[in-house]
Image (cartoon, grey):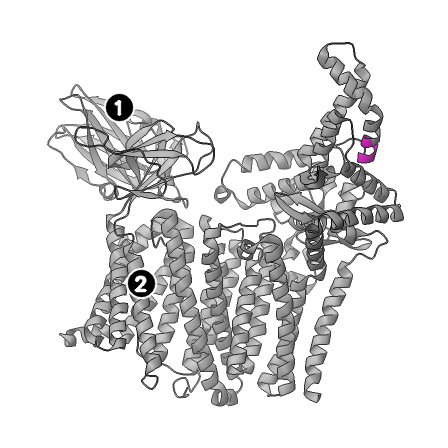
Amino acid sequence: MKRSIPSILGLIALIAYVLVQFASQKQMSDLDYAGFGTIPVERKNKILTIDSVARHALLEIHGTESIEGPEGRVSAVEWFMEIASGNIESPKRPIFRIINRDILALIRYNKPSTEADEPLLNRALALIPWSSINHSFASYEDLDSYSDKIFSHARTALRYSPQQRNEFENEIIKIARNINTFRSLSNTFSTVDGPSLKEAIDHLEQIATSGIEAVSRRQSGTPYDSKVYKEISDMGFAFQSMEQHAYFNVRTTSEGNIHWLSLGALLKRSITSGTIPREAVFYAELIDDYHNQELSAFNQRLEAEISEIETNQPADYYRSKIELFRNLLTPISGAIFGYALALLPAFITWLRPNRGYRRAAIAVTLGAYTLHSFNLLSVVYLMGVNSLVTNSFDSQFISWIAITISLGLIFKFRSSIAIAATVLVGLTILVFGRLDLIASYGRLISRDNEMLVVHILSNISIASGFVVGSLGGLFIFISLFSNRLIEEKTKQITQMIYFGLCLTTVTTAAALISHCIAEELRTGFFFNWTPVQSSLLMALLWYVIVINCKICNLTKGLGIMSLSTLSSVFAVWTWLGIRMLEIPEVDYGLPSAGLKFVLAFATGHVLLSGMGLLTRNTSSSNP
Amino acid sequence: MKVYFKPVSAINVLIGALCVSILLILVITVEQQRIGQSEAIRVYVNSFFVFWNFKSIGLTTPVFPGGYLVMAFFIVVFLARLFTSTSFTVSGIGKALVNIGLIVLLGSYLYTNISKTETQALLKPGERLNYGDDVHAFEVALVTDSENENERVFAIPQRMLERSQTIRHDDLPFSIRVDDFVLNSIIRERDESLPQNTRLADQDKGDSVYSTRIKNSKLGYKNNTPSVYVILFNKEESIGTWLLHEAWEPQRFEYKNKQYSLHLRARRIYYPFEVRFESFEASPGSTLLTTSLIGDNIQESNSKETVNGSNHFGYHIFLEDNLDENQASKVFVKRIPGKTIPLYAVALISVGLILILGSSQVNRKASPPAL
């Protein structure tokens, strides 16, 4: 029982963190934002909940899924309701993320604080080119007065291909798109620069019959009421404008079939039919309730709509529930916390063997791994298996593979170093992945089905390279301070690294061959020196060198570990390095300034490897 | 015999060569950022040595082995290992298969790389062509009328342009010297900012402008716009200096009552068939391209076929998807001899590795063999 206490405490801490996160995501409001967030809508042929659509929009504009306001944290769905209802405060929120200084100068934006006022941590973070500290945030009001200039620059920049644009041009296009996103969101549930949706519908109800008659009379050439005709024509234009600007389509049923149409399109139809669709009335009244802060009416209306969806489309209902649950749970941040938490007992048990801490490290790692797996499974369920290799999720996927391999090594070799390596590698990739996501926000790169296997194999190769490298690197690092480890653990760790290295070699060879076959189908050439092919070939050649060194007894023990340490360098080069070279084929929007960090990572590992090779019993330790 | 191969087949030699290749591949990848993929392959892979120009002392010297040399060396190493370590055991046969597979893989790459041709042509629906522009080379074409009223073309290949050579031909009344070939250039007006020692032309379009070197395009070799100065002269007199630029139309001149034109263009490669852009359909990928063989009597001898990415007469024809029927589409025609050989080589290596691993599993006491 005593040995289980650290495990229980660790798991309690992890669960507590997840629950706190969940609670903080849930809106503490009398309005049922969560219920509103579950309503399914359609955007770009994908059925998503309003919560997800609002999160994606905010991520695109702001780089985060919630914002901090004077009243505290504002969730994406709250922010969306604010815009959709035409709240006058919404254009004043500084949410537009701007990195480029020339754009700040263009809109004459003054950063509130000077660099000297920044705390030391922020100044350190500012060294990372894609760190959020380097951004300034402008409000829609700030940008709106310069929107002509912004759109003019964006139009000029769009004449060139992405590779021919400079940083300013790429950034101004993003800003222009974000302004459009904001305008689309505000026009989804209201007319463009016109009355509110409720007022428009009420007016339409009043003039529908006489308006239709005026239109038909005009068409047949008989006298008509020109005032009514003008009013109904203006409404038609207003609804058409709504249709063009709508950010997403809403669900509508006709004759038992579900269709996805914008509110503008629905209302445009009602001008000819004379009947206002139920869905339009629902959204108009809901927004009106929100605007007038009639909380109980808002919640009752929402409840009725949700129960209608549950009765008629139970599959959509449960899908929306799962999507919302995933959004609120934020399992990936729970997983990051779990891996970070597991590091502590993992290091303790490695430095001083203790079964209780060992169990705790494994238990917390498994807990974090469960959250991690749930996140990826939900991604596959909601967005399809292809989303695993988009730039938003591939870091999570690589990390998951690395941890799966490491967990396999833990159970095969029962080594405490594997636990430390597991959590370290998982944590590092996930944290880097978050930076990657922020750097390329809004740029989901979709891939063909044929390339799915190729990308998955590459990710497995990268992940196993990280595992082998981190195992070797960790052992060398600790060995610098403790001879006991070299004497006791070298044989076991060498076996583990060799096993991992063989796995990495096979997966890298498979990834390279599949890339070559895909390239042959695409261009006719088996090996075309593309950055991915070249980096995989480099990694494969290095693994062959290390395996030959082991087989031919050129080096042993710590020497093998030192050479294996460089696997991480090849993995990070294949994953991030080549993407930072700004070569058109693999340009995912990562800044080339990040290359110095890849170089620093590589230099650190080469130094570590060199130290390992220079340690006294490089060749005398007997595996 | 084995004695001679022994030093080359040593594991240290193999590891050394592998380390050199890793460095070379790293340089090729990084250099793609600076000079583009095609140029990086040309400079570092399709060469025996990587040259470095020490500008301060005006010396160009090899500093590192190029791709061809490294691959040739690997072939020698694997041949040596094949001769020295083959035995008639399961493991020995496995090793032999791996070595043969690697030799075939490298050999096929060299063979394909040397003998391939890649061309592209712009075609609109209804148009036909029996030649394409080489995507890796340019040429200067001097065109004149011949006696039977057909055009006669004298083409000066890029390697001669790069070496600034003088060309003489019995059928030409003058000699041609090409100078200052620049792979990617822009044309500037002559004004006060004209740099000193700039070469100037005195004929046609070149008499008021000059060419300036710019960075090579990263978007492919074909996206560069080269320029070159062409000087025509005979024993008695200098005829003139022309500046040729790839974006310009041919420049015409008359010499001894005969018409000539000079043009810097992508190297033309003629196919033994013609490509006809038959029809356009709205959905991408469904465009109908046809290829027809042209025989000695200019007779079409092949039935119409839809081709896109498929193998026809040993050529691979790809069409860039285009949704606008009025816009010309890019048709890529590639000849890639031995393109399937790498797959057989990979299969051989895989079988070899399976045999080696299988035998080591059966006889676990024996030390595992080297690859």
Q: Is the magenta stretch mostly helix, strand or loop?
A: helix
Q: Which x, y percent locates residue B243?
A: 30, 32
Which of labels 2 and 1 is toward the front?
A: 2
Residue closer to the observer: B17 or A374: A374
Quadrant, the C terminus of chain A = bottom left
> Mark 1 — residue?
B252
Discs 2 and 1 lie in a common subunit:
yes
Reply yes or no: does residue B147 show up in magenta: no
Q: Is mark 1 on a helix, strand or loop?
A: strand
Packing grade of label 1 (10 A; few <14, some 14-19, many >=20) is some
Within the image, what quadrant is residue B18 found in? bottom left
- Between discs 2 and 1, the one toward the N terminus: 1
Quadrant, the N terminus of chain A = bottom right
> Mark 2 — residue?
B347
Mark 2–mark 1 Cα distance, whole angstroms, equals: 56 Å
The residue lying at 55 percent from left, 57 percent from top is A388
User: Residue most toward the left?
Assistant: B170
Residue B340 is marked as none
Pointers 2 and 1 in contact (C-beta within 8 Å): no
* Parent chain of label 2: B
Residue closer to the observer: A40 or B248: A40
